[in-house]
Amino acid sequence: ANAHVKGRDYTGGLIGYSAAEIDDSYHIGNVYGGNYVGGVAGLSIYTMNNSFNKGHITGSNIVGGLVGQASDVNNSFSEGSVHGKTSIGGLVGVSKGTLSESYSKGNIKGTEDYVGGLIGKILYSSGDGITRNTILKSYFVGEVVGKNYVGGLVGIDTTSVYSKNVTNIISKSFSSGPVTGKSYVGGLLGGNTYHSEKGGRVNSEIDSAYHYEGEVLGDGENIGGIAGYTFGKISNSYV
């Protein structure tokens, strides 16, 4: 499809709310909306494969270059700027699955928290002691700007099941370009979370990943070339 699309909540270049798998689909043009806004879909609860968006995406919360909120995304990309308030991602605003062999290029800007070159917020909502490859063989090229929890790949890695421990792995991926925020700012990952009362936490492991050609800037606390704040192991990675 080649068209500009304008709506409110659940707005996508092709579909607002998808309850089925999306394969081999694309949108070229700009998309404007409120919450849950994406270049192809506003919200997708099943897998997206071999799909792309080329155009500028503008919304409020949970906004992505490809999809506002997604499950698994494979072999897909987005090229163009993505602007909004919170949970803003160059490819996915909020991810509840795995992102593999995908990329985003553009200017990604959120006026509030949780902004990432690929994913604004990783939100895992089930499982006990789960380990999974969250981002694999994927990359971002461009500029990322936000407030708190800002990353070249991921803004924040968190879970809605605070009593469980979850390990999410970012592997064989990279970001290129400046990353700017206030606190919890990283070249790849802004930060992850720990719940002091219930004891659960997200361990964001980073393996064979790197950030290059761009400053990582913050005027608050927890600023890092790879990660602003993480409980997970970092290996074979560099800036």
Image: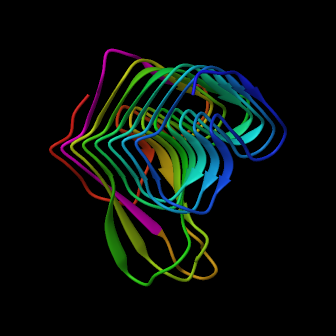
Is any atom of residue 193 visible in this view? no
Is 88 located above or below residue 143 in the figure? below
Q: Which residues are magenta?
A: 202-218
Query: Which quadrant of the figure has residue 137?
Result: top left
Above or below: residue 79 compared with residue 77? above
Residue 72 in the image: state x and y as whole percent.
43, 57
Residue at left offset 64%, top offset 52%: 43
**Location of residue 88 in the rendering, given as x and y in whole percent from the top left corner:** 62, 38
Quadrant into which the C terminus falls: top left
In this rendering, is residue 178 above or below 157?
above
Number of numbered discs? 0
Residue 100 coordinates in the image, percent (x, y): 31, 48
| 208 within the magenta span | yes
Dominant secondary structure (helix, strand or loop) of the stretch shown in magenta: strand
Q: Which residue is the extreme one toward the left?
A: 236
Q: How is the image coloured?
A: rainbow
- Residue 54 x/y as whole percent: 51, 22
For the N terminus, the image quarter is top right
Q: Residue furthest front?
A: 1
Which residue is depicted at the point 34% across and 37% down? 226
Viewer-closest of 193 and 129: 129
Tell me if I can see residue 58 in this picture: yes
